[in-house]
Image (cartoon, rainbow, N blue to C red):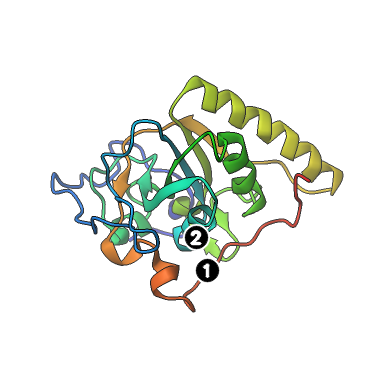
Amino acid sequence: MLSFKDKMSIPTVEEALPGREQVMQVPDAHFVNGHTLTGPFPQHLSKAVFGLGCFWGAEKKFWQQQGVYTTAVGYGAGSTKNPTYQEVCSGMTGHNEVVLVVFDETVCSYEKLVRLFFESHNPTQGMQQGNDKGTQYRSGIYYFSEEQKLLAESVIMQYQKKLSNKNMGDITTEIIEAGEFYYAEDYHQQYLAKNPNGYCGLGGTGVLFD
């Protein structure tokens, strides 16, 4: 049985659960806008992946943005292949609860999404977000290009200055290259649209860019 302390540290590849070859089955269409959930996506669109606590509320933040084509929730930055929600919550996969955002850069820039990411949660809390504690709730930006990486690093520096001016802590957000995105179970997709009164543990610092 894992202790609480164990769930606050990411397991090594050797320690992580092995997972499975079977891919998670999800709906063809986004519950809110009807666009494809899994692709293929129109070639002119870009992708971004963020982890900012419980992915139910996080996904809603992004699907509401103009220029966002589709969103999906899933698991990323871990070792277990095609994990289940229960496995991720066990702390033995290394995965984070993340949101895939497919967007039109001509309408909504990547920098705008990163700013929204920071304003929508508290990026100083390490392996937790509010009362949600564990490695799957860590703050993370998972980039698809060097340009995305540099933009994310630039925005982090800007936001850290604003937090420091409010006597708040250091940002713990990890910035790493996007690996495999594993879709979460059907019932997690667009959860707050299907369950308007559902739980949302997302809470920002109140510090805004503008």
User: Residue at horizontal 62%, vertical 40%?
Assistant: 112
Residue 18 location, x and y as percent?
A: 21, 44
Pointer 1: residues within 10 angstroms few (<14), some, or many (20+)? Answer: some
Q: How many marks?
A: 2
Pointer 2: residues within 10 angstroms few (<14), some, or many (20+)? Answer: some
Q: Nearer the viewer, mark 2 or mark 1?
A: 2
Q: Is residue 99 visible?
A: no
Specify the amino acid type for callout 1. Answer: Cys
Q: Residue furthest top?
A: 146
Q: CA distance from mark 2 to mark 1?
A: 10 Å
Assign a secondary structure to mark 2: helix
Residue 210 location, x and y as percent?
A: 78, 46
Image quarter hosting the N terminus: bottom left
User: In the rendered view, does 9 fall on the left or right side of 22?
Assistant: right
User: Residue at horizontal 53%, vertical 22%?
Assistant: 147
Residue 14 location, x and y as percent?
A: 28, 37
What residue is disc 2 on? 60
Residue 200 got which mark? 1
* Relative to 181, residue 190 above or below: below
Answer with the quarter of the image where residue 25 lies.
bottom left
User: In the rendered view, does 4 fall on the left or right side of 182?
Assistant: right
Answer with the quarter of the image where residue 115 lies.
top right
Specify the amino acid type for callout 2. Answer: Lys
Q: Is residue 167 visible?
A: yes
Residue 109 location, x and y as percent?
A: 57, 36
Q: Earlier in the sequence, mark 2 or mark 1?
A: 2
Q: Residue furthest left?
A: 22
Assign a secondary structure to mark 1: loop
Contact (Cβ within 8 Å) of mark 2 with mark 1: yes
